[in-house]
Amino acid sequence: MEPIRWRVEEFASIDSTNTWLAARAAAGEPEGLVARADFQTAGRGRLDRRWESPSSSSLLSSILLRPKVLDSERYLVSVAVSLAARAALVRLSGVRPMLKWPNDLVVGHAKLGGLLAEAVKSPDVDLAVVVGIGINLTWSGPNGDASTCIKDIAGVTLQPRAVLDLLLEELENRLAALYQSRGDELRDELRGALSTLGQHVHVEGPTQSIDGVALDIDERGRLQVQTSREVVSIDVGDITHLRVVEGQSP
Ligand code: BT5
Protein backbone atom coordinates (compact mmCIF):
# COMPACT_ATOMS: atom_id res chain seq x y z
CA MET A 1 0.00 0.00 0.00
CA GLU A 2 1.21 3.50 -0.86
CA PRO A 3 1.74 5.51 2.33
CA ILE A 4 -1.09 7.98 2.88
CA ARG A 5 0.02 11.60 2.48
CA TRP A 6 -1.47 13.26 5.57
CA ARG A 7 -2.29 16.96 5.16
CA VAL A 8 -3.28 18.62 8.44
CA GLU A 9 -5.29 21.87 8.37
CA GLU A 10 -5.47 23.64 11.74
CA PHE A 11 -8.13 26.09 12.95
CA ALA A 12 -8.34 28.26 16.07
CA SER A 13 -12.13 27.99 15.83
CA ILE A 14 -14.51 26.18 13.50
CA ASP A 15 -18.14 24.99 13.63
CA SER A 16 -17.25 21.28 13.49
CA THR A 17 -14.20 19.59 11.99
CA ASN A 18 -16.49 16.79 10.74
CA THR A 19 -18.81 19.23 8.95
CA TRP A 20 -15.88 21.05 7.33
CA LEU A 21 -14.18 17.84 6.20
CA ALA A 22 -17.41 16.27 4.91
CA ALA A 23 -17.89 19.28 2.62
CA ARG A 24 -14.34 18.85 1.29
CA ALA A 25 -14.97 15.12 0.82
CA ALA A 26 -18.17 15.82 -1.12
CA ALA A 27 -16.15 18.10 -3.41
CA GLY A 28 -13.82 15.17 -4.25
CA GLU A 29 -10.86 15.75 -1.91
CA PRO A 30 -8.46 12.76 -1.91
CA GLU A 31 -7.94 10.78 1.28
CA GLY A 32 -5.48 11.98 3.89
CA LEU A 33 -6.88 15.45 4.56
CA VAL A 34 -7.11 16.02 8.32
CA ALA A 35 -8.76 18.88 10.20
CA ARG A 36 -7.78 19.89 13.73
CA ALA A 37 -9.34 22.70 15.74
CA ASP A 38 -8.63 24.30 19.11
CA PHE A 39 -12.32 25.06 19.51
CA GLN A 40 -15.64 24.02 17.92
CA THR A 41 -18.73 26.22 18.07
CA ALA A 42 -20.98 23.31 17.03
CA GLY A 43 -19.09 20.13 17.93
CA ARG A 44 -21.30 17.13 17.21
CA GLY A 45 -21.85 13.77 18.81
CA ARG A 46 -24.16 11.13 17.35
CA LEU A 47 -27.81 11.95 16.66
CA ASP A 48 -28.38 15.49 17.91
CA ARG A 49 -25.94 15.27 20.77
CA ARG A 50 -23.29 17.90 21.31
CA TRP A 51 -19.58 17.46 21.83
CA GLU A 52 -18.35 20.05 24.28
CA SER A 53 -14.83 21.26 24.91
CA PRO A 54 -13.30 24.54 26.10
CA SER A 55 -10.61 25.98 23.81
CA SER A 56 -7.34 24.01 23.53
CA SER A 57 -8.36 21.43 26.12
CA SER A 58 -8.83 18.46 23.77
CA LEU A 59 -7.85 16.81 20.58
CA LEU A 60 -10.67 17.77 18.18
CA SER A 61 -9.93 16.30 14.81
CA SER A 62 -11.39 14.64 11.72
CA ILE A 63 -9.69 12.36 9.21
CA LEU A 64 -10.76 11.78 5.60
CA LEU A 65 -10.28 8.24 4.29
CA ARG A 66 -11.39 6.52 1.11
CA PRO A 67 -10.98 2.93 2.26
CA LYS A 68 -10.97 0.17 -0.29
CA VAL A 69 -12.77 -2.37 1.83
CA LEU A 70 -16.00 -4.33 1.58
CA ASP A 71 -19.09 -2.62 2.97
CA SER A 72 -19.19 -5.24 5.71
CA GLU A 73 -15.71 -4.22 6.85
CA ARG A 74 -16.19 -0.48 6.76
CA TYR A 75 -16.77 -0.36 10.52
CA LEU A 76 -13.11 -1.36 10.87
CA VAL A 77 -12.07 2.07 9.60
CA SER A 78 -13.32 3.81 12.72
CA VAL A 79 -12.08 0.87 14.79
CA ALA A 80 -8.61 1.53 13.30
CA VAL A 81 -8.85 5.18 14.38
CA SER A 82 -9.94 4.25 17.93
CA LEU A 83 -7.14 1.73 18.28
CA ALA A 84 -4.61 4.20 16.87
CA ALA A 85 -5.78 6.81 19.39
CA ARG A 86 -5.44 4.29 22.19
CA ALA A 87 -1.90 3.36 21.10
CA ALA A 88 -0.90 7.04 20.81
CA LEU A 89 -2.19 7.77 24.32
CA VAL A 90 -0.31 4.80 25.77
CA ARG A 91 2.91 6.02 24.18
CA LEU A 92 2.49 9.64 25.30
CA SER A 93 0.92 9.29 28.74
CA GLY A 94 0.90 5.65 29.80
CA VAL A 95 -2.92 5.80 29.93
CA ARG A 96 -4.45 2.79 28.17
CA PRO A 97 -8.14 3.54 27.57
CA MET A 98 -10.55 0.78 26.72
CA LEU A 99 -13.09 0.95 23.93
CA LYS A 100 -16.76 0.85 24.76
CA TRP A 101 -18.74 -0.50 21.84
CA PRO A 102 -19.40 1.09 19.48
CA ASN A 103 -17.60 4.43 19.65
CA ASP A 104 -16.31 5.52 23.06
CA LEU A 105 -12.85 5.65 24.63
CA VAL A 106 -13.25 5.02 28.35
CA VAL A 107 -11.14 4.75 31.47
CA GLY A 108 -13.09 2.72 33.98
CA HIS A 109 -16.66 3.89 33.46
CA ALA A 110 -15.65 7.45 32.55
CA LYS A 111 -15.74 8.69 28.98
CA LEU A 112 -12.39 10.03 27.80
CA GLY A 113 -13.27 10.44 24.13
CA GLY A 114 -15.67 9.62 21.36
CA LEU A 115 -15.77 8.97 17.64
CA LEU A 116 -18.20 10.11 15.00
CA ALA A 117 -17.82 8.35 11.63
CA GLU A 118 -19.81 9.65 8.68
CA ALA A 119 -19.94 8.34 5.11
CA VAL A 120 -19.93 10.90 2.31
CA LYS A 121 -20.95 9.94 -1.23
CA SER A 122 -19.97 12.03 -4.20
CA PRO A 123 -20.08 11.24 -7.94
CA ASP A 124 -17.07 9.65 -9.64
CA VAL A 125 -14.96 9.14 -6.53
CA ASP A 126 -14.66 6.31 -4.03
CA LEU A 127 -16.85 6.55 -0.99
CA ALA A 128 -15.36 8.80 1.67
CA VAL A 129 -15.46 8.18 5.37
CA VAL A 130 -14.91 11.11 7.70
CA VAL A 131 -13.86 9.91 11.13
CA GLY A 132 -14.07 12.58 13.82
CA ILE A 133 -12.45 12.10 17.18
CA GLY A 134 -12.56 14.09 20.38
CA ILE A 135 -10.25 13.23 23.29
CA ASN A 136 -10.26 15.16 26.57
CA LEU A 137 -6.70 16.14 27.44
CA THR A 138 -6.92 18.82 30.16
CA TRP A 139 -10.69 19.24 30.74
CA SER A 140 -12.54 16.34 32.28
CA GLY A 141 -15.75 16.67 30.29
CA PRO A 142 -19.27 17.78 31.13
CA ASN A 143 -20.53 14.76 33.04
CA GLY A 144 -18.84 14.69 36.45
CA ASP A 145 -17.52 11.21 37.29
CA ALA A 146 -18.91 9.87 34.02
CA SER A 147 -16.29 11.75 32.00
CA THR A 148 -12.56 12.26 32.45
CA CYS A 149 -9.33 13.58 30.87
CA ILE A 150 -5.70 12.51 30.52
CA LYS A 151 -4.46 15.22 32.92
CA ASP A 152 -6.71 13.99 35.74
CA ILE A 153 -5.67 10.38 35.21
CA ALA A 154 -1.94 10.69 34.53
CA GLY A 155 -1.04 14.23 35.62
CA VAL A 156 0.45 15.09 32.24
CA THR A 157 -0.54 17.87 29.84
CA LEU A 158 -0.50 16.59 26.28
CA GLN A 159 -0.51 18.88 23.25
CA PRO A 160 -3.35 18.07 20.84
CA ARG A 161 -1.08 18.24 17.79
CA ALA A 162 1.40 15.79 19.33
CA VAL A 163 -1.42 13.32 19.99
CA LEU A 164 -2.70 13.75 16.44
CA ASP A 165 0.73 13.20 14.83
CA LEU A 166 1.25 9.96 16.73
CA LEU A 167 -2.33 8.86 16.08
CA LEU A 168 -1.80 9.25 12.32
CA GLU A 169 1.42 7.23 12.52
CA GLU A 170 -0.38 4.44 14.39
CA LEU A 171 -3.32 4.65 12.00
CA GLU A 172 -1.14 4.09 8.96
CA ASN A 173 0.02 0.70 10.35
CA ARG A 174 -3.53 -0.38 11.11
CA LEU A 175 -4.89 0.61 7.71
CA ALA A 176 -2.09 -1.36 6.06
CA ALA A 177 -3.08 -4.37 8.19
CA LEU A 178 -6.73 -3.89 7.25
CA TYR A 179 -6.03 -3.76 3.52
CA GLN A 180 -3.63 -6.72 3.62
CA SER A 181 -5.26 -9.21 5.97
CA ARG A 182 -8.97 -8.48 5.59
CA GLY A 183 -9.26 -7.13 9.09
CA ASP A 184 -8.37 -10.23 11.12
CA GLU A 185 -5.54 -8.47 12.97
CA LEU A 186 -7.67 -5.44 13.72
CA ARG A 187 -10.54 -7.57 14.99
CA ASP A 188 -8.14 -9.36 17.34
CA GLU A 189 -6.77 -6.05 18.63
CA LEU A 190 -10.34 -4.80 19.01
CA ARG A 191 -11.36 -7.82 21.10
CA GLY A 192 -8.46 -7.13 23.47
CA ALA A 193 -9.46 -3.46 23.79
CA LEU A 194 -13.23 -3.73 24.21
CA SER A 195 -14.36 -3.20 27.78
CA THR A 196 -17.86 -4.18 26.69
CA LEU A 197 -17.11 -7.90 26.28
CA GLY A 198 -18.12 -9.96 29.29
CA GLN A 199 -20.26 -7.11 30.65
CA HIS A 200 -23.98 -6.99 31.29
CA VAL A 201 -25.34 -4.57 28.71
CA HIS A 202 -28.59 -2.80 28.24
CA VAL A 203 -29.06 -1.78 24.61
CA GLU A 204 -31.70 0.76 23.75
CA GLY A 205 -32.79 1.11 20.16
CA PRO A 206 -35.70 2.76 18.37
CA THR A 207 -37.79 -0.41 18.30
CA GLN A 208 -36.22 -2.74 20.83
CA SER A 209 -34.46 -2.78 24.16
CA ILE A 210 -32.27 -5.73 25.11
CA ASP A 211 -30.63 -6.90 28.32
CA GLY A 212 -27.93 -9.52 28.34
CA VAL A 213 -24.23 -10.30 28.43
CA ALA A 214 -21.98 -9.08 25.60
CA LEU A 215 -20.22 -12.19 24.30
CA ASP A 216 -18.16 -11.09 21.30
CA ILE A 217 -18.21 -9.11 18.08
CA ASP A 218 -18.75 -10.98 14.84
CA GLU A 219 -16.96 -10.46 11.51
CA ARG A 220 -19.30 -7.58 10.62
CA GLY A 221 -18.68 -5.80 13.91
CA ARG A 222 -22.05 -6.75 15.38
CA LEU A 223 -22.18 -7.10 19.13
CA GLN A 224 -23.36 -10.57 20.15
CA VAL A 225 -25.54 -10.33 23.24
CA GLN A 226 -26.70 -13.38 25.18
CA THR A 227 -30.16 -12.67 26.56
CA SER A 228 -32.08 -15.09 28.77
CA ARG A 229 -33.51 -16.70 25.63
CA GLU A 230 -31.12 -16.31 22.69
CA VAL A 231 -28.05 -14.65 21.21
CA VAL A 232 -28.99 -11.35 19.59
CA SER A 233 -26.74 -9.55 17.06
CA ILE A 234 -26.70 -5.78 17.46
CA ASP A 235 -25.81 -4.34 14.07
CA VAL A 236 -23.10 -1.75 13.86
CA GLY A 237 -25.14 -0.20 11.04
CA ASP A 238 -27.65 0.85 13.68
CA ILE A 239 -25.12 2.46 15.94
CA THR A 240 -26.52 5.95 15.60
CA HIS A 241 -29.79 4.67 17.07
CA LEU A 242 -28.35 2.67 19.90
CA ARG A 243 -27.02 3.38 23.33
CA VAL A 244 -25.18 0.68 25.22
CA VAL A 245 -25.11 0.87 29.00
CA GLU A 246 -22.51 -1.37 30.60
CA GLY A 247 -23.08 -2.88 34.01
CA GLN A 248 -21.21 -5.31 36.25
CA SER A 249 -19.34 -8.30 34.91
CA PRO A 250 -21.44 -11.43 35.32
C1 BT5 B 1 -19.56 10.89 20.53
O1 BT5 B 1 -20.92 11.03 20.41
O2 BT5 B 1 -18.99 10.45 21.49
C2 BT5 B 1 -18.80 11.39 19.33
C3 BT5 B 1 -17.97 12.61 19.64
C4 BT5 B 1 -17.18 13.05 18.44
C5 BT5 B 1 -16.56 14.40 18.67
C6 BT5 B 1 -15.57 14.77 17.59
S1 BT5 B 1 -14.70 16.23 17.99
C7 BT5 B 1 -14.09 16.34 16.38
C8 BT5 B 1 -15.22 15.93 15.44
N1 BT5 B 1 -16.03 17.06 15.07
C9 BT5 B 1 -17.28 16.98 15.56
O3 BT5 B 1 -18.17 17.83 15.42
N2 BT5 B 1 -17.40 15.81 16.25
C10 BT5 B 1 -16.19 15.02 16.21
P1 BT5 B 1 -21.98 10.40 21.44
O4 BT5 B 1 -21.69 8.94 21.66
O5 BT5 B 1 -23.30 10.78 20.86
O6 BT5 B 1 -21.72 11.15 22.80
C11 BT5 B 1 -22.16 12.45 23.02
C12 BT5 B 1 -22.39 12.62 24.52
O7 BT5 B 1 -21.12 12.61 25.20
C13 BT5 B 1 -23.05 13.94 24.90
O8 BT5 B 1 -24.44 13.83 24.89
C14 BT5 B 1 -22.51 14.20 26.30
O9 BT5 B 1 -23.28 13.48 27.27
C15 BT5 B 1 -21.15 13.53 26.27
N3 BT5 B 1 -20.08 14.50 26.06
C16 BT5 B 1 -20.09 15.68 25.39
N4 BT5 B 1 -18.88 16.25 25.39
C17 BT5 B 1 -18.07 15.41 26.10
C18 BT5 B 1 -16.71 15.43 26.46
N5 BT5 B 1 -15.88 16.43 26.12
N6 BT5 B 1 -16.23 14.39 27.20
C19 BT5 B 1 -17.01 13.36 27.58
N7 BT5 B 1 -18.32 13.28 27.26
C20 BT5 B 1 -18.83 14.29 26.53
Image: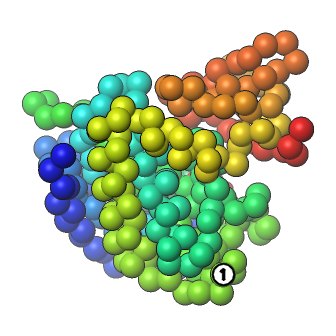
Q: Where is residue 53 shown, x and y percent of the image? A: 54, 71
Query: Could you tell me how many numbered marks the image carries?
Result: 1
Which quarter of the figure has residue 11? bottom left
Judging depth in this view, the residue of 116 and 84 nearest the camera is 84
**Quarter occupied by the C terminus:** top right
Can residue 242 be seen at all in this image of the molecule?
yes
Look at the numbered disc 1 and give the secondary structure of its residue.
Answer: helix
Judge left or right: residue 227 versus residue 131: right
Which quarter of the figure has residue 233? top right
Residue at image location 38% in from the left, 70% down from the top: 166
Task: Kindly identify the amino acid type of the residue bearing the numbered disc 1.
Answer: Ala
Judge left or right: residue 100 versus residue 55: right
Can residue 14 be seen at all in this image of the molecule?
no
Which quadrant of the render holds ligand 1?
Answer: bottom right
- Mark 1, other Cα within 10 Å: few <14 / some 14–19 / many ≥20: few
Q: Where is residue 131 shown, x and y percent of the image? A: 39, 50
Residue at image location 59% in from the left, 87% down from the top: 156
Question: Measured along the vertical axis of the image, is residue 158 above or below residue 215?
Answer: below
Q: Where is residue 207 shown, x and y percent of the image? A: 69, 19
Residue at image location 71% in from the left, 43% down from the top: 196
* Residue picked out by circle 1: 154
Which quarter of the figure has residue 122? top left
Judge left or right: residue 108 versus residue 141: right
